[in-house]
Image (cartoon, rainbow, N blue to C red):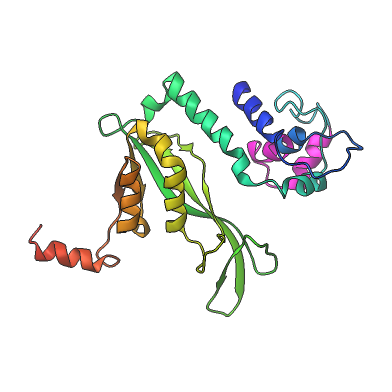
Amino acid sequence: MEGLLSGLRAVCGTFPDARQWRPDNLSMADVGMAAFSLFFMQSESFLSHQRRLQRGRNGCNCQTLFGMEKIPSDNHIRDLLDSAPPELLEPCFDQVLDEMRHNGGLRHFERLGGRVLIALDGSEYFCSEKRGCPRCLTRKRSNGKKENYHTLLAATLVAPGHNRVLPLMPELIAPQDGAEKQDCERNAAKRWMERHGAGMRDMRPVYLGDALFASQPMCQAVLAQGGDFLFVCKEESHKTLYEYIHGAGIP
């Protein structure tokens, strides 16, 4: 745990800092760890968590657990972290996977003769009719109202009978430069395969996904990176394929 938290703190220290000067001498590492502590402690309220941190050592583990020298305010955290691209956190995901590789942790996830299973799925984490940003996706509901939302393609190491999962670096589903159509799960999955597939090849991965991923381009993207796949393929969503199966007389 100490090694992983130290790695996260080092990564947070690389976040871009737009301040011209630091009257409070507050480091970006402390800002990043303060934001992480909210999720680590599973607090339901950003503000109430912040107040607990501000009460000092008797009320939190900000110094002993997270190594924070100074506690930033919630406004400081928002102002300083909003411009940090999520891709900067990729070394943290790589560190966890490397620890699993070198310490034998991946053995607990191996199935199908020593292979690992990586589940691909989309996950929405923000939606609003009033707020939005340039990286928002948009949709129109049946009642005519427009929604702005954020979603991502999650890649997760899973194993039947194992009560733990290992999140891998996700791929954000967001407007892409030069694209005419809105981004989607399938396109994000292809980008994920291009960026991370080669690094997973030594684990002999089998990629899992719902019927959305059961398409020829997606299957080819997996095979090109040395993986295999188990994608859901329902008769109502893949009529042409089932017509071929029934025509071939396959039971």
Give the dominant element type of the magenta stretch: helix, strand or loop. Answer: helix
Residue 1 falls left or right of residue 24: left
* Residue shown at the point (27%, 65%) measured from the top left: 238
Question: Which quadrant is home to the N terminus?
Answer: top right
* Residue shown at the point (75%, 29%) measured from the top left: 62
Is any part of residue 214 visible from this angle? no
User: Foreground residue, 179 or 228?
Assistant: 179
Which residues make up the magenta segment?
33-55
Q: Position of residue 60 (x, y in %)?
A: 76, 30
In the image, residue 103 sits, relative to residue 209, either above or below, namely above
Question: Which quadrant is home to the C terminus?
Answer: bottom left
Residue 146 falls left or right of residue 227: right
Question: Residue most toward the front?
Answer: 178
Which of the 4 image quarters holds residue 164? top left
Q: Position of residue 70 (x, y in %)?
A: 83, 31
Question: Residue most toward the left?
Answer: 249
Which of the 4 image quarters holds residue 64? top right
